[in-house]
Image: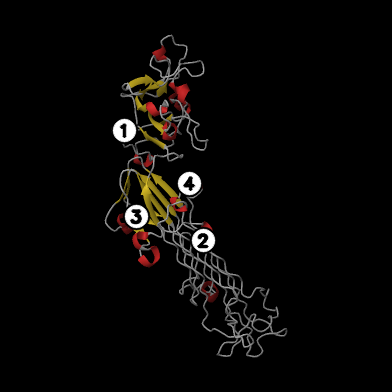
């Protein structure tokens, strides 16, 4: 993070009757001869990420030299430094990506660091006298202006976006850092104006991180900016103090079908100046091949169905429960689907729930069917090699009127297609939807696969090609 400015002087008076400290600590006479302080504190330094944050830039209208030391006595003793990217251990541009891979499971998908805040100062404080009677135990302060400081800008956030096929970015992914706080604009008339305008500025926050992975990545347009990881600007005040600028963020792009190049993607990256980002934005952008996903949640893939609603007019829909005592095994399960399975002898459909003569394992009391054998859990946060190869969930809502476009239903009640507050959470069984009020009259399902469990040759998940024929039993009332 960018360093913050420290107060100048370090020990502030507590009021106008407090005797000023020794010469050089508080009141510096200006050329006009008044006992008015020109002391400023350091603004904040900029935050760092792929590049260092900028150092603070203090300024004063009247630099004053301390005759005893020859230094600027009305400047802060320490200028706030910008953050240092070296602390993150980022490998050089072009090297095999480790930190630049931004892999979240390794703790590397991180946002930018924030900028430091400015320090408090006494600029404009005066004792109402003339040199040399500006300091000492017999001199009181006429005006006491203890300027508060502005805060530093926040660091840009971090995001991973993944698509199993084509990832098209036609808008703007904005992970830029926030600007440091500034003194009030010159037109501010809130008294005393100089205190509002003289706040020591904050440093800018560093840009964040964007990780985009897909079979094909399409940043639309020719030179339109689609991903922004610029650092925030340092703040300023009316005496030209400036906070340090924030450093730049990181971008990682991986594709499994398309061959990415920095030359083709750099025109869509901000910032783009060669001095900062280098040729093909190499300082902030790295590209590569998306390997077979082995880590969660990258290994998750799936889709949501369109909405399904029984035809006709009815009061409500009752989603059936399982009837495991039914003598007809085909009528025991209120929802079911077929697993598309091929171990090398040809594809066949096998029931997910309930007995099937073609099950590729020996049914037992604990695993009588595919549902029990594979499980039906979402695997995020559990150890590798554990969990279910697939999970099925259901969601309901109450449609208003006819369901003319089941694949493009607006879930905003303002659009008049669904009843307000009728969208349910995702549930494990359609009959769970009967517990909600208002009760849903339409349903959709989602199937999520965890391909990390199909990486082992000749394993049952490795022979599963998908699912089909999902059916839900319901009774319109």
Up the image or down, 238 lies above or below 446; here it is below
**Quadrant of the rendered image containing residue 327:** top left
Q: Where is residue 34 drawn, in percent x and y?
A: 59, 88
Nearest to the eye among marks 2 and 3: give it: 2
Q: Earlier in the sequence, mark 2 or mark 4?
A: 2
Judge left or right: residue 45 versus residue 222.
Answer: right
**Quadrant of the rendered image containing residue 464:** top left
Judge left or right: residue 454 versus residue 165.
Answer: right
The residue indicated by pointer 3 is 226
The residue indicated by pointer 1 is 406
> Circle 1: is it few (<14), some (14-19), or many (20+) Cα within 10 Å?
some
Up the image or down, 136 lies above or below 350; here it is below
The residue indicated by pointer 4 is 104
The residue located at (38%, 26%) in the rendering is 463
* Disc 3 secondary structure class: loop
> Circle 3: is it few (<14), some (14-19), or many (20+) Cα within 10 Å?
some
Up the image or down, 102 lies above or below 470; here it is below
Rounded to the nearest angstrom, the CA distance separating label 2 from label 3 is 28 Å
Q: Where is residue 225 drawn, in percent x and y?
A: 33, 57
The numbered dot on residue 86 is 2
Nearest to the eye among marks 3 and 4: give it: 4
Contact, CB < 8 Å: mark 2 with mark 4? no
């Amino acid at each position: 993070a960018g360093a913050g400015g420290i107060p100048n002087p370090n020990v502030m008076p507590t009021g106008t009757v407090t005797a000023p400290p020794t010469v050089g600590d508080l009141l510096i006479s200006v050329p006009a001869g008044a006992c008015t302080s020109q002391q400023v504190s350091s603004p904040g330094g900029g935050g760092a990420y792929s590049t260092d944050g900028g150092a603070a830039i203090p300024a004063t209208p009247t630099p004053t030299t301390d005759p005893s030391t020859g230094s600027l006595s009305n400047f802060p003793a320490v200028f706030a430094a910008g953050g240092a990217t070296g602390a993150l251990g980022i490998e050089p541009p072009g090297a095999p990506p480790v930190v630049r891979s931004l892999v979240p499971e390794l703790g590397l998908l991180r946002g930018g660091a924030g900028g430091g805040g400015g320090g408090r100062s006494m600029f404009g404080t005066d004792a109402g006298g003339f040199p040399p009677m500006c300091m000492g135990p017999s001199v009181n302060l006429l005006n006491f202006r203890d300027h508060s400081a502005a805060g530093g800008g926040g660091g840009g956030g971090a995001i991973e976006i993944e698509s199993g096929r084509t990832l098209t970015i036609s808008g703007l992914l904005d992970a830029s850092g926030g600007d440091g706080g500034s003194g009030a604009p010159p037109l501010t008339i809130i008294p005393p104006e100089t205190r509002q305008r003289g706040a020591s500025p904050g440093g800018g926050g560093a840009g964040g991180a964007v990780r985009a992975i897909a079979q094909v990545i399409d940043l639309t347009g020719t030179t339109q900016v689609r991903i922004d990881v610029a650092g925030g600007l340092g703040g300023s005040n009316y005496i030209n103090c400036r906070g340090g600028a924030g450093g730049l963020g990181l971008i990682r792009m991986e594709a499994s079908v398309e061959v990415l190049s920095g030359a083709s993607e750099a025109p869509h990256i901000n910032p783009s100046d060669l001095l900062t980002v280098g040729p093909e934005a190499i300082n902030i952008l790295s590209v590569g091949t998306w390997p077979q996903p082995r880590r969660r949640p990258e290994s998750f893939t799936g889709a949501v169905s369109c909405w399904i609603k029984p035809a006709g007019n009815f009061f409500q829909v009752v989603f059936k429960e399982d009837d495991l005592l039914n003598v007809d095994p085909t009528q025991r399960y209120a929802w079911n689907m077929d697993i598309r399975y091929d171990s090398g002898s040809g594809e066949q459909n096998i029931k997910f729930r309930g007995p099937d003569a073609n099950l590729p394992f020996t049914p037992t009391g604990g695993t009588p069917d595919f549902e029990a054998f594979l499980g039906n859990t979402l695997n995020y946060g559990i150890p590798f090699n554990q969990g279910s190869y697939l999970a099925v969930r259901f969601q309901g809502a109450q449609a208003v009127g006819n369901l003319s476009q089941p694949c493009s239903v607006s879930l905003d009640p303002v659009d008049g297609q669904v009843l307000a507050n009728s969208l349910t959470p995702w549930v494990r069984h359609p009959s769970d939807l009967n517990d909600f009020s208002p009760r849903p009259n339409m349903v959709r399902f989602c199937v999520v696969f965890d391909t990390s469990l199909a990486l082992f040759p000749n394993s049952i998940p490795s022979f599963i090609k998908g699912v089909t024929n999902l059916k839900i039993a319901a009774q319109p009332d």
